């Protein structure tokens, strides 16, 4: 199975700062990578699919890039509601797998 | 409004069984693949199973293969997960999730609120 490794585990930033989250795959997943946001007690929310396509209703401050094994989720300017846990997920191979998550916390 | 509503969770003994349901509304259910994703307390997300829009193709994580069965009734707009031979490590919140567009388990754009399954004696 494809292992997705996210880094860092925790990112401590202030509102207005830029957040850069990484997801590395154990083998190429082409561009078949998605990103989700999850807040405590809530279901995940799809942000990005196929590496760079924003899901419906997702603000433009969220962007995704990368292909092959290295991917990045960028939040250009953190809003208070963006502090949450972020997961990447691949759809290149079965079984589908998620990364272990990156927590973006308020500094 | 597009909505998914899970039910059927609860406390079950090891070796027992449970059937989860997910009622869908607000979209053409038969046109989309559907998925189950679980999250153990304090842990990350784990994809469990997927089913195509017609129900003709199913997929499972190795951890549940042979024990869980995914199915759907397109006439009732409902997704199911039959869970047999349950283990303590199956304890988690189970989410049903809709695929974002054509394909199976591509990405999950609509999620239910989740239903808790606890396997314990």
Image (cartoon, rainbow, N blue to C red):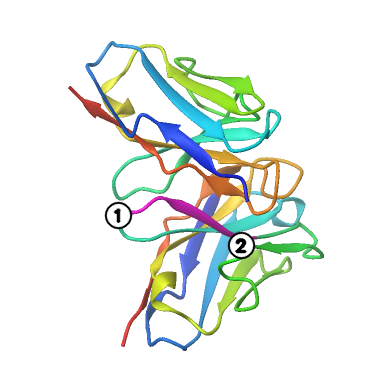
Q: Residue at x 72, y 51 (%)?
A: B32
Q: If the image is split into quadrants, where does the C terminus of chain B sit?
A: bottom left
Please, is residue B88 above or below residue A42 in the view? below
Regarding residue B1, the answer to whether it shows in the image is no
**Residue B52 on image: x %, y %:** 75, 57
Q: Residue at x 24, y 29 (%)?
A: A105
Residue on which disc 2 sits = B61
* Side (left or right) of A14 relative to A96: left
Q: Which residues are magenta?
A: B43-49
Give the letter of the chain under mark 1.
B
**Residue B12 on image: x %, y %:** 39, 84
Regarding residue A17, the answer to whether it shows in the image is yes
Q: For numbered disc 1, what is the local secondary structure?
A: loop
Marks 2/1 same chain: yes
**Residue B57 on image: x %, y %:** 79, 62
Q: If the image is split into quadrants, where does the N terminus of chain B sit?
A: top right
Give the main secondary structure of the magenta stretch: strand
* Side (left or right) of B20 relative to A80: right
Residue on which disc 1 sits = B42
Give the letter of the chain under mark 2.
B
Mark 1 Cα shell of 10 Å, populated few (<14), some (14-19), many (≥20): few
Please, is residue B30 above or below residue B11 in the view? above
Please, is residue A45 above or below residue A52 in the view? below
A70, A83: nearer the viewer:
A70
Q: Which mark is residue A1?
A: none
């Amino acid at each position: 199975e494809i292992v997705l490794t996210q880094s860092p585990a925790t990112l401590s930033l202030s509102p207005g700062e830029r957040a850069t989250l990484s997801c590395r795959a154990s083998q190429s997943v082409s561009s078949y990578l998605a990103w989700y946001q999850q807040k405590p007690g809530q279901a995940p929310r799809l942000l990005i699919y196929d590496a760079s396509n924003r899901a419906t209703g997702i603000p433009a401050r969220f962007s995704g890039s990368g292909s092959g094994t290295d991917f990045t989720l960028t939040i250009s300017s953190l809003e208070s509601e963006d502090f949450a846990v972020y997961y990447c997920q691949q759809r290149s191979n079965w079984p589908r797998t998620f990364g272990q998550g990156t927590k973006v916390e308020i500094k | 409004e597009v909505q998914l509503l899970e039910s059927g969770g609860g406390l079950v003994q090891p070796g027992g069984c449970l059937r989860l349901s997910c009622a869908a509304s607000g979209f053409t259910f038969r046109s989309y693949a559907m998925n189950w994703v679980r999250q153990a307390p304090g842990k990350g997300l784990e994809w469990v199973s997927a089913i195509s829009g017609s129900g003709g193709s199913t997929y499972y994580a190795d951890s549940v293969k042979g024990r869980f069965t995914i199915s759907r009734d397109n006439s009732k707009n409902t997704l199911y997960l039959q869970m047999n031979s349950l283990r303590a490590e199956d304890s988690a919140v189970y989410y049903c999730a809709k695929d974002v567009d054509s394909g199976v388990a591509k990405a999950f754009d609509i999620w239910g609120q989740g239903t808790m399954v606890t396997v314990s004696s």
